[in-house]
Image (spheres, rainbow, N blue to C red):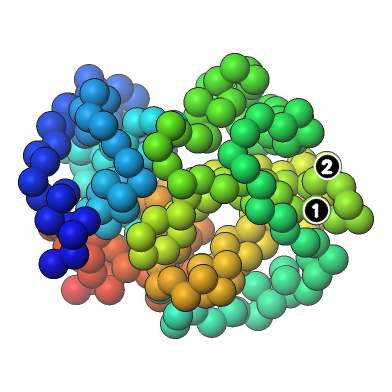
C-alpha cells in the first residue's frame, strides 16, 4: 500500500446526499448526487483516490450520482494502452492534422472565454448553460486543489478550442471540452479530436487511463463514449470490463 493510500484511509471523508432534482440526462426522472463534504481539505492526491472510486468534480465540488430509483449513470475509464483507432477516428485525425496543442495554465484567458461563451450558447440553448458568465467560468472548470491544465488547440496560430484536463495519479481526466462552433469547425469533429488527443497525451506520459466521466446507455449525449474502447465501468464498488447486465 502506498503512502498516499495509507494517508487517504486515515482521514475519513463525510458524504452528503443532495436534494432530489430533475435529471439532466434522462427526461422524466429524478436524480440525487452524493457530495464529498465541501469543508473537507481536498488535494489532487485525495482526488486521485476518489476518481478511482467513481467520483468526479465540478469546480471544487466532488460528487457521484446516487439516485434512489436509477443506477444508469456509470463511471467509465479508457485503457489507453490497449486503445486502437477506428477508421472514422483515423479520418478525424487526418482532418485535423494541422491542429496543434499547447499546455496552458488554468487561468482566465479572454480568447478562450469567448470561444467557451460561443460554444455553450450554440450547443446548449435552453439548457441552463446558454447564459455564460465570465465570473462563473473558472468556478465551473477549475478548482483550488486540482492539477488542471487547459490544453489549447490552435490552427495557424489561432485558438480554436480547449480541452480542460485534470492530471491524476494513474491517468488523465477529461473535464470539459469546448471549441469554436463555426460551421467549418463543426465539420472537423473537434470533440472527437479532443478525446483522441488526450488519449495520446496519456500515452505520452506513460499513464494507463483516460477518465471519461459518466456513461449512460439510453442517453445519446453520454453513450457516444462507446466509440472508445476498451472501457472499464465502475459499479458495485469495482471496475468491470462490461457494463451492468452484460457480465
Other-residue count near label 1 (Cα within 10 Å), few / some / many at <14 / 14–19 / ≥20: some
- Does 217 sit left or right of 71 as displayed? right
Badge 2 marks a residue whose secondary structure is loop
Q: Nearer the viewer, residue 136 or 118?
A: 136
Residue 68 x, y percent position in the rendering: 15, 35
Q: Nearer the viewer, residue 216 or 9?
A: 9
Say which of marks 1 and 2 sits in front: 1
Q: Nearer the viewer, residue 100 or 126?
A: 100
Q: Is residue 131 above or below residue 197?
A: above
Q: Is residue 26 above or below residue 212?
A: above
- Does 14 sit left or right of 241 as displayed? left
Q: Residue at x 66, y 47 (%)?
A: 104
Q: Residue at x 28, y 71 (%)?
A: 242
Residue 134 x, y percent position in the rendering: 64, 20
Residue with the mark numbered 1: 154
Rendered-image quadrant of the C terminus = bottom left
Residue with the mark numbered 2: 182
Amino acid at each position: 500500500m502506498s503512502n498516499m493510500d495509507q494517508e487517504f484511509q486515515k482521514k475519513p471523508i463525510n458524504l452528503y446526499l443532495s436534494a432530489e432534482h430533475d435529471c439532466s440526462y434522462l427526461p422524466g426522472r429524478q436524480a440525487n448526487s452524493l457530495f464529498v463534504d465541501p469543508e473537507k481539505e481536498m488535494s489532487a492526491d485525495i482526488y486521485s483516490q476518489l476518481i478511482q472510486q467513481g467520483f468526479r468534480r465540478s469546480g471544487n465540488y466532488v460528487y457521484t450520482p446516487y439516485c434512489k430509483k436509477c443506477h444508469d449513470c456509470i463511471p467509465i475509464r479508457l485503457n489507453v494502452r490497449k486503445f486502437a483507432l477506428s477508421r472514422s477516428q483515423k479520418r478525424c485525425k487526418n482532418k485535423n492534422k494541422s491542429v496543434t496543442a499547447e499546455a496552458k495554465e488554468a487561468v482566465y484567458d479572454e480568447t478562450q472565454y469567448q470561444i467557451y461563451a460561443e460554444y455553450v450558447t450554440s450547443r446548449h440553448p435552453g439548457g441552463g448553460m446558454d447564459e455564460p458568465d465570465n465570473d462563473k467560468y473558472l468556478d465551473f472548470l477549475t478548482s483550488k486543489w486540482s492539477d488542471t491544465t487547459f490544453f489549447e488547440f490552435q490552427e495557424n496560430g489561432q485558438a480554436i478550442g480547449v480541452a480542460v484536463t485534470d492530471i491524476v495519479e494513474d491517468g488523465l481526466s477529461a473535464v470539459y471540452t469546448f471549441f469554436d462552433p463555426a460551421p467549418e469547425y463543426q465539420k472537423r469533429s473537434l470533440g472527437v479530436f479532443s478525446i483522441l488527443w488526450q488519449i495520446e497525451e496519456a500515452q505520452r506520459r506513460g499513464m494507463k487511463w483516460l477518465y471519461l466521466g459518466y456513461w449512460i446507455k439510453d442517453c445519446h449525449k453520454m453513450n457516444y463514449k462507446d466509440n472508445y474502447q476498451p472501457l472499464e465501468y465502475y459499479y458495485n464498488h469495482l471496475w468491470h470490463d462490461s457494463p451492468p447486465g452484460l457480465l
